[in-house]
Image (tube, helix red, strand yellow):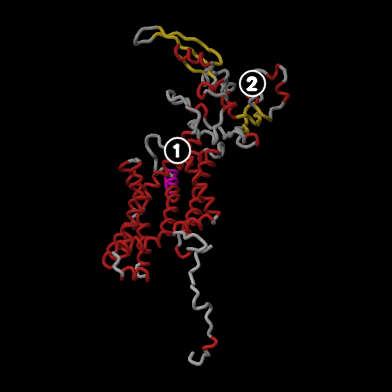
Amino acid sequence: MMNIDKSKLVLVHSTDQMIFDQPLKTKEIGYYKDSWNRFKKNRASLSAFIIIMIMLFFVVLGPSMKVYTLPKKDPNEAARIQYLPPRIPGIEKLGIFDGERTISRGKNFLVAMAKSEFGSDVIISGMPDVLLDNDPSNDGIYADKTALEVTVDFYKYTNFIKSYMPEDYFSIQGTEVQKLAKVTRNFTKAQFDDAVKRNVIIDLVAIEQSTNPDTGNSETTYIVRLDQFRYSLNQNPEDTYFWFGTNIRGEDLFTKIWEGARISLSMAVVILAINTTIGLLIGSVVGYYGGVLDLLFDRLVEIISSIPFLSVLTLLTLRYGNALWVIVLAFTATGWLGSYGLGRMQFYRFKNREYVLAARTLGASDARIMFKHIFPNTLGLIITAVALSIPSFVFSEASFSFLGIIKYANGVTSVGMLIEEGQAMMGQYPHLLIFPSLYIATLMIAFNLFGNGLRDAFNPSLRGVE
């Protein structure tokens, strides 16, 4: 350095020229803005986020989107429209979700249905034309019990067998059983007048007079056949749409899925908030201070974690029932251990980093160091764990509901209970299993992709990385 010729050292500017810093050409962005920019570039996570928002929209508003209000006075009313297949307006024109189903029924019954005015348009295809001619031998009771396979509009078909003629109409001929007993209704004078006003009566089968033993007054009973769909739903079968079909109780499956999802997700948020708050607070303190406190809590955590969760859940439900608070208590009794372990590990990992030592040297308090310097660096993993905990709880709750361990009281239905019902009937009515299972699968995949995207977005080491 001492032998360098000074004449070769030339200033890049003259002595009378001032040099100024160049202004930044881009706007300064903060940590969260930068995280959002990275998250938007992850198409899979962004798509998962949109799917989650759509599902949350239906969870909030889905149960109120139903347009059918079944009568509540008669508990058997809804069951008259059970097992209807999915029918979605617009999509039905594509040949899917059109409310059609292939059935196998006796020839007598199908001929009678095809020739009746009320059921003439029920059969879509598969009915031989030879059985529909005017040959008298095709009327009455047949010796041939051959079954025919036909495709029917199942909404109209259900209305036919519930309103006009039951499926066993011909099989009980010659017995003491009333052939129309399954489709007739006994009405009082007021009920009959109301049905006449609504124009839902197919025909009047009989009028019976009786004496009330309590009052001694004469009472009139009207035995009628009703158009079941118009009486129950104020709709004709061709104008009725159940997007996901109906279940064994005649309930709209679309509505029941979102009602069950509302219960599951609400409980997931409550349980997640409790577990995360308790676990992170204890874990951060234990991980930061360590020492004897760490040893004591490690022993306590080992004892609690050795208790099987299934035993806790079973004992609590057997003792206190299936109230919502019991389920919350069961899932929080040991559920905070995961957040505790995450918080302890992250605070133990970062407490001796250079920037933490610098903050401590400058006089920062422990609380400021913990929540200003260490906590943001753990945020990525915490958010990922939180995002993955929601579908984990939903899946666990659905599994225990499916197994019958969790049975909510007061008519509360969960998605797991719907899957249990669908599993029993999946051979005949697959829609009862497909739609609840599809909801669970979609929720799990979407939250996993969403959580992975959040983990990468909130990773401080990736800040500024394109």
Front of the two marks 1 and 2: 1
Residue furthest out toward the bottom? 3
- Residue at the spot 57% in from the left edge and 27% down from the top edge: 158
Nearest to the observer: residue 63 or residue 320: 63
- Residue at the spot 45% in from the left edge and 48% down from the top edge: 395
Q: Which residue is mark 2?
A: 112
Query: Per the image, is 13 magenta?
Result: no
Query: Per the image, is 401 magenta?
Result: yes
Left or right: 263 in relation to 196? left
Nearest to the observer: residue 278 or residue 54: 54
Magenta span covers which residues?
A: 396-402
Q: Is residue 344 above or below residue 330?
A: below
Q: Secondary structure at mark 1?
A: helix
**Does the residue at mark 1 contact the one at mark 2 (Cβ under 8 Å)?**
no
Question: Label 1 neighbourhood size at 10 Å, few (<14), some (14-19), many (20+)?
Answer: many
What amino acid type is highlighted by mark number 1?
Glu
Q: Is any part of residue 177 visible from this angle?
A: no
Q: Which residue is mark 1?
A: 259
Q: Secondary structure at mark 2?
A: helix
| Displayed quadrant of residue 145 | top right
Nearest to the observer: residue 83 or residue 86: 86
Residue 146: percent from left, percent from top: 66, 28
Q: Is residue 82 above or below residue 355?
A: above
